[in-house]
């Protein structure tokens, strides 16, 4: 009982530390620096402490100080309660969704079974989607409550876009569920021990569609019509300042990490190295004793998982800074007229293959 | 009197005509099937940006020596560009060797200035030479058009390459008097030769 509690608290603190303590501040820096390098620029490099700039790594700290000292502004005529609530609604799902994503296998540690996932739900995948659709409420409510035309248009666009892409994303996932036969994400991860059982080989079309829909769901370029700077000032968060604005920003970055984690878990072998199973890792680290071997194997699992996640974060950033924005009707046409039929055909073909096998 | 060679003394500027080749423009706007599949074109675009990313990352970690760097951003306060002679910075008065100004206070620049930035109070020496007792240039009004330089018969006012020190907290501080405007002739020598070419002043 006590051991379970300690295990849960350690895992929650770990995921919180990695997501909020590491990824969310560092991704702001990564976004600036990577876009700069891709466009032959230098990027942010001026904030310094005692003359050391450390390739611009102090900029997140400077940003945090700036944001904390800014005025918290609520426009005249806005719905005060919902205007304040909206950033929380859009930030929370991004944090919570990581609870069901496994970042390692199951190991025996000091006579206690450790499962490297915060909440091993049997409806894990559904849980992720339930919370992903909650995030769209944040955008819609923020747009509606701001009493601003641009915010309202951004909120409308966000609601329509997220609704239509959620449909396609749900249909994509059915292919994965059919192949692995479970909704539990830790089981989906555990089934990908064999390199050629990775989701990318079993569901290649599903991967492309899921990744695209996930970017559209996150409202980043090329699908950022909801916050298009050149059309609507900043979209649904035009009227936000200070800490509330940063919460939208953090929600977006944490969702990048969550998308990376989901894609890794479903299509890229979760915590597995290619051709290496957990038992092989334990055998390899035999010299450290049973507990030491388990700890080393857990470390290898976590490093493997987060390396894959970081790769997918890099990929999302590259897509974001390479492709121009879709026009709004093109976004809708892509979602309903192209992705929906392809997803349905994908389900059909997956079913046929399973039947033939 | 006019020297025909002046025309051939134009400084060489810009891209030489031989290097200006017209780019081939794609006329058909109809996309091919390959392009309408979109994903392959996305991969092609991402290939280009990824190459740029990794080359620049390499240049970031191991900076190449000399001027061979790929990122040409100028780190402004530490690095400064050498400006071309055609650049019109703030106007300065040209100083003779003995420390007096070349200006004879004819008042042409005061007359032509479209922003009325120049104010001259003229005086006369014992030998009959005119000189400006006070020459005030209001930098808050100056539009950097260069008319004063063009109209000046004595090459006494030229547009220098200076562009710093023009931000003040008080507009009164931007009324530059003679001591702030005078610069030795050596520092604006290139510009004087350049304006002889472009304005074709025949009296030299």
Image (cartoon, rainbow, N blue to C red):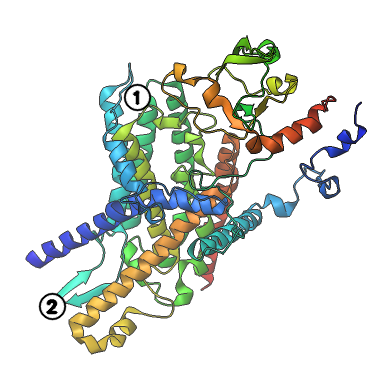
**Rendered location of residue B197, percent (x, y):** 81, 33
Looking at the picture, do discs 2 and 1 lie on one chain?
yes
Q: Residue furthest front?
A: B126
Q: Measuring 41% from the left and 29% from the top, which residue is drawn there?
A: A238
Q: How far apart, in angstroms, are the residues tagged by discs 2 and 1?
A: 53 Å
**Rendered location of residue A198, percent (x, y):** 46, 70
Q: Determine the secondary structure under disc 2.
A: loop
Q: Is the residue marked by circle 1 packed among few (<14), some (14-19), or many (20+) residues within 10 Å?
A: many
Q: Residue furthest bottom?
A: A287
In the figure, residue A189 lies in which quadrant? bottom left
Residue beneath disc 1: A145
Q: Is residue A20 visible?
A: yes
In the figure, residue A291 lies in which quadrant? bottom left
Q: Measuring 23% from the left and 60% from the top, which residue is drawn there?
A: A14
Residue beneath disc 2: A111
Q: Chain of mark 1?
A: A
Judge left or right: residue A113 versus residue A336.
Answer: left
Q: Is residue A227 above or below residue B157?
A: below
Q: Is residue A261 above or below residue B174?
A: below
Question: Tag 1 or tag 2, which sits nearer the N-term?
Answer: 2
On the rendered image, what quadrant is the N terminus of chain A found in?
A: bottom left
Q: Measuring 29% from the left and 58% from the top, which residue is drawn there?
A: A18
**Rendered location of residue A38, percent (x, y):** 55, 53
Q: Chain of mark 2?
A: A
Judge left or right: residue A249 versus residue A326.
Answer: left
Q: Is the residue marked by circle 2 packed among few (<14), some (14-19), or many (20+) residues within 10 Å?
A: few
Q: Determine the secondary structure under disc 1.
A: helix
Q: In this orientation, which residue lies closer to the viewer: B182 or A81?
A: B182
Q: Is residue A181 visible?
A: no
């Amino acid at each position: 009982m006590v051991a379970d509690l300690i295990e849960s608290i350690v895992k929650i603190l770990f995921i919180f530390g990695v997501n909020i303590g590491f990824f969310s501040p560092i991704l702001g820096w990564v976004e600036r620096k990577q876009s700069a390098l891709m466009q032959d620029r230098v990027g942010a490099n001026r904030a310094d402490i005692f003359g050391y700039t450390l390739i611009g790594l102090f900029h997140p700290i400077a940003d945090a100080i700036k944001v904390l000292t800014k005025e918290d502004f609520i426009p005249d005529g806005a719905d005060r309660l919902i205007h304040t609530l909206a950033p929380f609604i859009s930030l929370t799902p991004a944090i919570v969704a990581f609870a069901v994503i496994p970042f390692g296998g199951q190991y025996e540690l000091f006579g206690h079974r450790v499962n490297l996932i915060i909440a091993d739900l049997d409806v894990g995948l559904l849980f992720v989607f339930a919370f992903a659709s909650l995030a769209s409420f944040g955008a819609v409510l923020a747009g509606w409550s701001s009493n601003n035309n641009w915010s309202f248009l951004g909120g409308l666009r966000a609601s329509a876009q997220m609704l239509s892409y959620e449909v396609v994303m749900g249909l994509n996932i059915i292919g994965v569920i059919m192949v692995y036969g479970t909704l539990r994400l830790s089981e989906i991860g555990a089934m990908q021990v064999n390199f050629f059982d990775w989701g990318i080989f079993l569901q290649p079309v599903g991967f492309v569609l899921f990744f695209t829909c996930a970017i559209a769901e996150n409202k980043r370029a090329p699908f950022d019509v909801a916050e298009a700077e050149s059309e609507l000032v900043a979209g649904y968060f035009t009227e936000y300042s200070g800490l509330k604005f940063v919460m939208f920003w953090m929600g977006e970055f944490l969702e990048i990490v969550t998308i990376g984690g989901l894609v890794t878990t479903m299509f890229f072998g979760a915590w597995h190295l290619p051709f290496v199973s957990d038992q092989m890792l334990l055998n390899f680290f035999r010299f450290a004793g049973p507990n030491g071997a388990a700890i080393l194997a857990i470390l290898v699992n976590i490093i493997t998982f987060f390396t894959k996640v970081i790769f997918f974060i890099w990929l999302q950033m590259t897509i974001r800074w390479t492709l121009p924005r879709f026009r709004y009707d093109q976004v809708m046409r892509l979602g309903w007229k192209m992705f929906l039929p392809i997803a349905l055909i994908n389900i059909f073909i997956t079913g046929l293959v399973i039947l033939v096998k | 009197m006019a020297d025909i060679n002046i025309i051939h003394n134009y400084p060489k500027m810009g891209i030489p005509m031989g290097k200006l080749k017209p780019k081939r423009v794609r006329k058909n706007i109809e996309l091919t099937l390959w392009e309408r599949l979109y994903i392959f074109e996305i991969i092609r675009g991402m290939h280009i940006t990824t190459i740029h990313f990794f080359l620049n990352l390499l240049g970031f970690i191991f900076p190449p020596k000399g001027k061979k760097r790929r990122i040409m951003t100028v780190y402004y306060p530490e690095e400064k560009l050498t400006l071309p002679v055609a650049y019109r910075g703030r106007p300065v008065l040209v100083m003779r060797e003995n420390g007096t100004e070349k200006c004879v206070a004819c008042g042409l620049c005061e007359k032509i200035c479209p922003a009325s930035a120049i104010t001259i109070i003229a005086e006369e020496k014992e030998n009959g030479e005119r000189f400006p007792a006070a020459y005030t240039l209001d930098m808050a009004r100056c539009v950097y058009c260069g008319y004063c330089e063009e109209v000046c018969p004595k090459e006494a006012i030229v547009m220098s390459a200076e562009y710093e020190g023009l931000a003040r907290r008080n507009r009164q501080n931007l009324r530059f008097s003679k001591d702030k405007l005078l610069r030795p002739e050596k520092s604006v020598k290139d510009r004087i030769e350049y304006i002889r070419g472009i304005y074709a002043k025949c009296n030299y």
